[in-house]
Image (cartoon, rainbow, N blue to C red):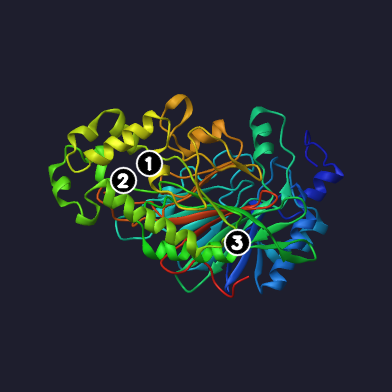
Amino acid sequence: MKKGQKKETKDEAKIKKTVFRRDVEIDKVGKGQRFIVSSIVEGASIAWDFVHAMEHYAEVNNAKLVLLWMRGVYKGDHLNEKDLNYVSPYLASTYRFNSKLVAKDFMLHPAQKFPTTGLQQYAQSNDSIIIASTKQAMTVVARPVGRTPHTIHTTGTVSMPRYSKTRVGCIAEEDNTLGGLIIEVADSKQFFIRQIQWIDGCFVDLGTKYTKDTHGKAEASAMVLGDIHFGDEDPLAIEITEEQINLLKPKRVFLHDLASNNSINYHDAKDCIKSVTKAPEFDTLEKEWSYVKSALHDFKTAIPNNTSVYVVPSNHDDFIYKWLKEGEFIKDARNAKLGAKLFLMSVDGKNPMAECLNVPGVIFLKKDTSMKVDGWECAQHGHIGNNGARGSIKSYAISYDKAVIGHSHTPGINGHIWQVGTLSKFKLSYTKGPSSWLHANCVIYKGGHSQMLIFVGDKWYVGEKH
């Protein structure tokens, strides 16, 4: 030993013999259709019941378990020999599922607040990516018209790291999510991703609850649908949504932006071209609402009778209030007669849309109301933010503990705020430029488990119905 060199302790000598994530790259290529993916953090205690439940899922569903190996919170953190030997068959730092989807560790610190930050450009120029993280998040990357947007997902973890007592550490401990992703690979290009969370000794995927040694039916408490926009809806997206509802049988369904209300859209008031090129079947509010009522009735008929349907107050629905409040209906010859009736309804404190679109079993929620389902706020659209400002998924993360919102047509996950996509067509009269819109609904299961159900075309999962 050189002069002045500190003598190694037994622990330091042992650590040197240990394999560290920062010194190892494990690249794997997936073979198969279904995978269950999470992350494991060096130096952290492991939720073994969760790991065993994932193994049980893999056995039941002929899936492969993948654990993305993350660096530790502290420099000297490492997996002990016993844990390393057990999980080594599942470990990877990079895992390619098909030509369009890859999972990577990226060596993020476990306490990083926004794990998808700065990776949009990487996903745009490469593939959709899954990031090893102690949190669950999702970001959609806008792509040119006609091309499917790429998605960035983070995994959640099977670990419970020892965070510092600093501001960053306390926030990280609050955000740490025991969870993972179910990945289904349809072919060399198509895939589907769903989230799972380990809550009260189980996780749920597509209506089936898994523990470390059992599985059985899970109850779906609610589904929050992507903005529906009857009149501009995508018929196939509605059909797939009805299929999802009939499979999962949620007790409640929440609808956002029920009607586009294009016939009185104040954004088009001074657009002469749009005013004369509106589809004749929707050129008056009476015609438009007649269609919406019929479509709503058909939708209600297509889903289980015991599923309650709620309409969430939304910005497109608010077009009617602005139109009435500013007296625009008086100047609108085609809609003036109906407008006068609706004006009187509003004066009497009634909801004009609820009065005119009266379909049995459909309940119109009031503005600024709250309706929580298994801890998730489901009565907020997402267009109104703090103190009346414009709403966003980030602003809602400040004000709400857990909520599922709509509005942006772009699905996303930011902490405990989940935002659904749209059920409308992707190309509408007001869309322009690259798009991040996707068809996506969110399901909430009893106990607070949640999954985002993204679908492309007529597919939303692989394999037999659960």
314 horizontally vs 278: left or right: right
Q: Amino acid at mark 1?
A: Asp
343 horizontally vs 455: left or right: left
Residue 297: image location, x then y, percent: 43, 58
The residue positioned 40% from the left and 30% from the top of the image is 348
At mark 2, the secondary structure is: loop
Instruction: Find disc 2 in the rendering and name its residue.
Output: 261
Instruction: Find disc 1 in the rendering and name its residue.
Output: 317
At mark 3, the secondary structure is: loop
Q: Amino acid at mark 2?
A: Asn
Quadrant assignment for the N terminus = top right
245 horizontally vs 423: left or right: right
Circles 1, 2 touching at the beta carbon (< 8 Å): yes
Choose the circle earlier in sequence order: 3 or 1. Answer: 3
- Asked where in the image residue 388 lies, by quadrant, the reply is top left
Q: CA distance from mark 2 to mark 3?
A: 30 Å
Instruction: Find disc 3 in the rendering and name its residue.
Output: 249
Residue 458: image location, x then y, percent: 43, 69
Tag 2: Cα neighbours inside 10 Å, few (<14), some, or many (≥20)?
many
- Asked where in the image residue 342 lies, by quadrant, the reply is top left
The residue positioned 55% from the left and 31% from the top of the image is 398
Choose the circle earlier in sequence order: 1 or 2. Answer: 2
Q: CA distance from mark 1 to mark 2?
A: 7 Å
